[in-house]
Image (cartoon, rainbow, N blue to C red):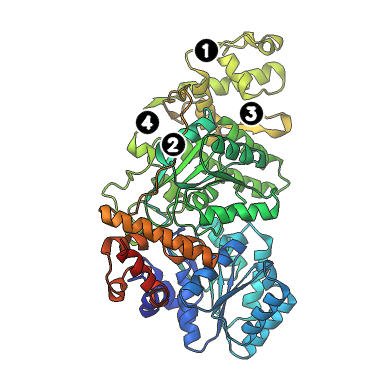
């Protein structure tokens, strides 16, 4: 196994549980693998595929949900000298026929296909033929969380993949995902009939990612300030909930001199593909997108992921933020959210046609995310706890981190880096709940958040006067708090399910069973002190984005080599119609620039340079380095 890792892929050693997984699957065992984005999941089936074919056991079929992922992975395998192909809608009928012919003749090591194609009679007949000749080696089911109704990206087509076990029981299967809580894991095992599979769970920790969650004031201004201060000239992804907002934010970023592109399902397919290609191939592009964008995107140098709207659950948040820093270098996960985000997510759950049990599960997942957002303690500790991991006790060192000496702080989230001031909001929470109760008693129906806060703050608006709410006993008892403070109290009460939004009654507020404990003072409510709002001055546009920094410290000559190597790599990638990182990652170019190689022998052993790449590009790399 190690010889394939080094010779084909150019990596000196395995990371974390990779070797155990690969040995188990190569020996014919089933496996369910949970490994964070950037942890090296693809090698867990690519190396067994190569090893099993070398042993005469035939072809590996990879079930993958996205065309972009298939294209990039097949391109990367070709660059490494591995025979791979995909079958999807981008192929002409002649290209598809040629691929099918090579498949039947056993000339392919890994074949990528979407779940929809796997279940067609034509494809199953081809698999039958391979099985009869003993040429069907392994099934790899990528993004396995898509099979679960509890997963954040459920796809009904994945449910039909049970046919693989039923029809080909002797062929081993490996299912892989970066995101699955205990409920989703159980669903994956049941739906894919993996009860006898060995479970491999890596640490979910991404120590290179810094988590920051801020209170939403002026989201666009906050985003601009974050990008200009932290990530000017870097590649990043900005997630928005609606298509309209995606286009508005992309336009505003462009107006401010930031290279940004929109991506959502409503765009023309050709434009959407062109924008994705530009994001993958160019440097420093910010993609503004709905969650339609991202799964399967292997771009390693995404330096930040920003959320302008709150996701639905922690799984979605973790999956989306995990697209930052896949190369292991420092990256940011930044999110701003406010009360309206909470209301919108609650309403979408309540108005969905799903069964009550399923909706209750969704509410629980949303409450966990709200708890993460409102937390005043370490965000990483809370995030990992959601996936049943105690920070500092899992194999985070396998992913390149150093286990902390303090298991309650990570030192790389906003709450750890800048501990927030907190205040005891228990009494304020009781006042707010009392007001919700009393106005409903007086009027016979509920009211929205704004009206309730007007009563608390003693504001005699037309609506307050019209309904006689100046006579409510809680009128004006909250005048000592600002509206942002009251909104923070309300968000926290929603986070602990002590207040609900009645979507059937115009998004009015109502009490819940959990309200009683808060009203009795049995549940303490502690909140961060609200920060000052954003400044009113407009940020000056940048004249030109700074050049990307190399991932390691280089002297002047090394920086010149790094820049020249990136230019050379861009030309090669363009000629091969591949993203630049498929040729070499930045980390590989930086290591080359640092070592200043004088011979092909000097290039051997640099991480990311396998035998095929050394043969294909070694001489050209030397010429680039020696020309300076």
Regarding mark 3 in the picture, which secondary structure is present there?
A: strand
Earlier in the chain: of badge 1 and badge 3, it is 1
Instruction: Return the residue nearer the eye: 418 or 265.
Output: 265
Residue 598, quarter of the rendered image: bottom left
Q: Are marks 1 and 2 in contact (CB under 8 Å)?
A: no
**Residue 362, image x and y in percent?**
61, 46
Instruction: Return the residue nearer the eye: 448 or 266.
Output: 266
Q: Can you tell which of label 1 and label 2 is closer to the viewer? A: 2
State the residue position of label 2. Answer: 228
Q: Quadrant of the N terminus?
A: bottom left
**Residue 308, image x and y in percent?**
55, 38
Q: Can you tell which of label 3 and label 4 is closer to the viewer? A: 4
**Residue 616, image x and y in percent?**
43, 75
Separation (CA) of disc 1 from disc 2 = 42 Å
State the residue position of label 4. Answer: 420
Say above or below: 6 vs 328: below
Say above or below: 512 vs 293: above
Separation (CA) of disc 4 from disc 1 = 26 Å
Regarding mark 1 in the picture, which secondary structure is present there?
A: loop
Earlier in the chain: of badge 3 and badge 2, it is 2
State the residue position of label 3. Answer: 510
Q: Are marks 3 and 2 in contact (CB under 8 Å)?
A: no
């Amino acid at each position: 196994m190690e010889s394939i890792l080094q010779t084909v892929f150019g990596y000196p050693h395995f990371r974390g549980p990779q070797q155990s997984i690969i040995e188990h699957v190569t020996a014919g065992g089933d496996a369910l693998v949970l490994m964070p984005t950037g942890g090296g999941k693809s090698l867990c089936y690519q190396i067994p595929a190569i090893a099993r074919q070398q042993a005469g056991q035939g072809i590996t079929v990879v079930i993958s949900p996205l065309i972009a992922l298939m294209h990039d992975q097949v391109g990367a395998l070709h660059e490494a000298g591995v025979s791979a192909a995909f079958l999807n809608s981008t192929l002409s009928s002649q290209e598809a026929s040629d691929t099918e012919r090579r498949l039947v003749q056993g000339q392919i090591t890994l074949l990528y296909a979407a779940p929809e194609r796997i279940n067609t009679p034509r494809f199953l007949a081809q698999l039958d033929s391979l099985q009869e000749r003993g040429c069907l080696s392994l099934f790899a089911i990528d993004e396995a969380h898509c099979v679960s109704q509890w997963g954040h990206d459920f796809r009904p087509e994945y449910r039909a993949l049970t046919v693989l076990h039923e029809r080909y029981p002797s062929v081993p299967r490996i299912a892989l995902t970066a995101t699955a809580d205990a409920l989703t894991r159980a669903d994956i095992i049941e739906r894919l009939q993996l009860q006898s599979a060995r479970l491999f769970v890596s640490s979910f920790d991404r120590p290179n990612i810094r988590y920051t969650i801020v209170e939403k004031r002026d989201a666009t201004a906050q985003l601009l300030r974050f990008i200009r201060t932290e990530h000017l000239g870097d590649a990043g992804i900005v997630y928005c909930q609606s298509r309209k907002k995606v286009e508005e934010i992309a336009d505003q970023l462009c107006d401010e001199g930031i290279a940004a592109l929109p991506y959502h399902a409503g765009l023309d397919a050709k434009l959407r593909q062109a924008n994705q290609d530009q994001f993958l191939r160019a440097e420093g592009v910010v993609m503004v997108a709905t969650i339609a964008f991202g799964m399967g995107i292997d771009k390693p140098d995404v330096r930040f992921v920003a959320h302008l709207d709150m996701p639905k659950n922690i799984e979605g948040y973790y999956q989306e933020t995990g697209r930052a820093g896949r190369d292991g270098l420092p990256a940011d996960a930044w999110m701003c959210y406010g009360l309206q985000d909470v209301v919108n997510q609650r309403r979408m759950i309540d108005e969905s046609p799903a069964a009550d049990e399923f909706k209750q599960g969704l509410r629980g997942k949303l409450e966990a995310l709200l708890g993460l957002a409102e937390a005043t303690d370490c965000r990483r500790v809370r995030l990992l706890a959601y996936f049943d991991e105690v920070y500092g006790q899992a194999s985070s060192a396998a992913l390149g981190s150093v286990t902390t000496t303090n298991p309650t702080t990570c030192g790389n989230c906003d709450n750890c880096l800048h501990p927030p001031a907190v205040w005891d909001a228990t009494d304020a929470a009781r006042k707010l709940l009392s007001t919700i109760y009393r106005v409903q008693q007086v009027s016979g129906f509920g009211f929205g958040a704004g009206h309730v806060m007007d009563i608390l703050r003693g504001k005699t608006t037309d609506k307050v006067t019209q309904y006689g709410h100046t006579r409510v006993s809680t009128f004006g008892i909250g005048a000592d708090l600002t509206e942002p403070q009251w909104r923070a109290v309300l968000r926290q009460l929603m986070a602990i399910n002590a207040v609900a939004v009645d979507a059937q009654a115009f998004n009015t507020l109502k009490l819940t069973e959990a309200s009683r404990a808060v009203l009795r003072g049995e549940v303490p409510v502690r909140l961060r002190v609200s920060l000052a709002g954003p400044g009113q001055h407009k940020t000056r546009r940048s004249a030109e984005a700074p050049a990307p920094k190399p991932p390691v410290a280089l002297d002047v000559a090394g920086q010149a080599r790094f820049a020249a190597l990136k230019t050379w790599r861009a030309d090669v990638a363009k000629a091969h119609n591949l993203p630049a990182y498929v040729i070499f990652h930045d980390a590989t170019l930086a290591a080359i620039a640092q070592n200043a190689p004088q011979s092909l022998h000097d290039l051997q052993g640099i991480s990311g340079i396998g035998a095929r790449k050394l043969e294909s590009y070694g001489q050209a790399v030397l010429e680039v380095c020696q020309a300076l």
